[in-house]
Image (cartoon, rainbow, N blue to C red):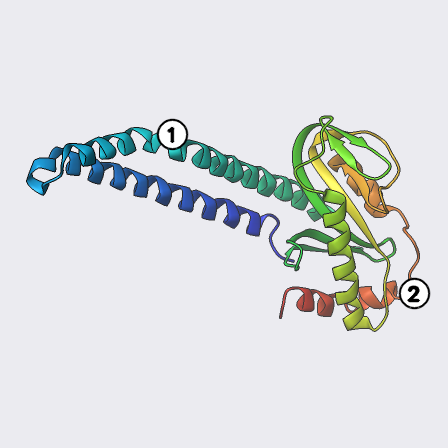
Amino acid sequence: MGQAGKSTRKMAQSRRRTTNLILVGVLILAILLALTIQNARALGLGGGAVLGLLILLRVLPDLIDKPIKRRVKEERRADRGAAAEEVVGDLLSGLNEDFFVLHDISSPYGNIDHIVIGKTSGVFLLETKAHGGRVEILQDGLLVNSKPPEKDFIAQALKNTYWLRDEIEKVIGSKVWITPVVVFTNAFVEAGKPIKGVYVVNKKFLPNLLHRQMKSSSGLSTIWDIRQRIAQRLEGR
């Protein structure tokens, strides 16, 4: 249920529109400054005012250069993120009828990319990452290309996991074990133990993980039976 990468695509498009509006606004401002300078005598502007306008016109491109580059970088990151979510979404669509999949679920801690309910294997929360290169598994965190990532992916996954656990509890009346997974679609992920209970894998190892029997939960059969009700709650219906 849902569409993988939908909200991230919208985010990228929104950022792109905002960037374009900023560029148009700066262009209009530059034209107005140039016209003002050209008609300075008719407007009664003195030499000091003209000089100030010339300086502003000259430094305007430099003033917006870094902010625009930052916004373009954020747009591209969102596009890559959406593509990664779509890749994992396609992979999950190949699971058999013993799996129920939800995509793009909104939470207070950022969207949950995918939720997988396995009839016998358990409930999984998937956070998808598009980073390339190499991922190192440490005892209390991870490194991407020998550097800490821009966000704490483990903390993000855990916050969403606790929220999801509480939401499901509101439907079934008891807590259920949820397995959080951070999935990298393009990076090589070193073998390692889960970090604070969060599995970190490359996409090719995800199907095997989803078929494994995780910690047993007395509520799993109930979750499977009322999975549509759970989906409706999570989707806000």
**Disc 1 target residue:** 62
In screen coordinates, is 144 left or right of 194? Answer: left
Is any part of residue 96 visible from this angle? no
SS at badge 2: loop
**Residues under labels 2 and 1: Cα distance?**
61 Å
Residue 221's quadrant in the figure? bottom right
Residue 6 is situated, as x and y percent measured from the top left of the image, at: 56, 51
**Disc 2 target residue:** 218
In screen coordinates, is 57 left or right of 109? Answer: left
Q: Amino acid at mark 2?
A: Ser
| Rendered residue at 9%/41% (across/down) | 44
- State the residue in front, 110 or 90: 110
- Which quadrant does the N terminus fall into? bottom right
- State the residue in front, 228 or 143: 143
Q: Which mark is residue 88?
A: none
Circle 1 Cα neighbour tier, 10 Å, few/some/many (<14 / 14–19 / ≥20): few
Mark before the other along the chain sequence, 2 or 1: 1
Residue 168 is situated, as x and y percent measured from the top left of the image, at: 77, 66
Residue 31 is situated, as x and y percent measured from the top left of the image, at: 22, 37
Callouts 2 and 1 close, C-beta under 8 Å: no
- State the residue in front, 23 or 54: 54
Look at the picture and state if 14 lies above or below 141.
below
Residue 160's quadrant in the figure? bottom right
| Rendered residue at 29%/28% (across/down) | 58
- Which quadrant does the C terminus fall into? bottom right
Q: Amino acid at mark 1?
A: Asp
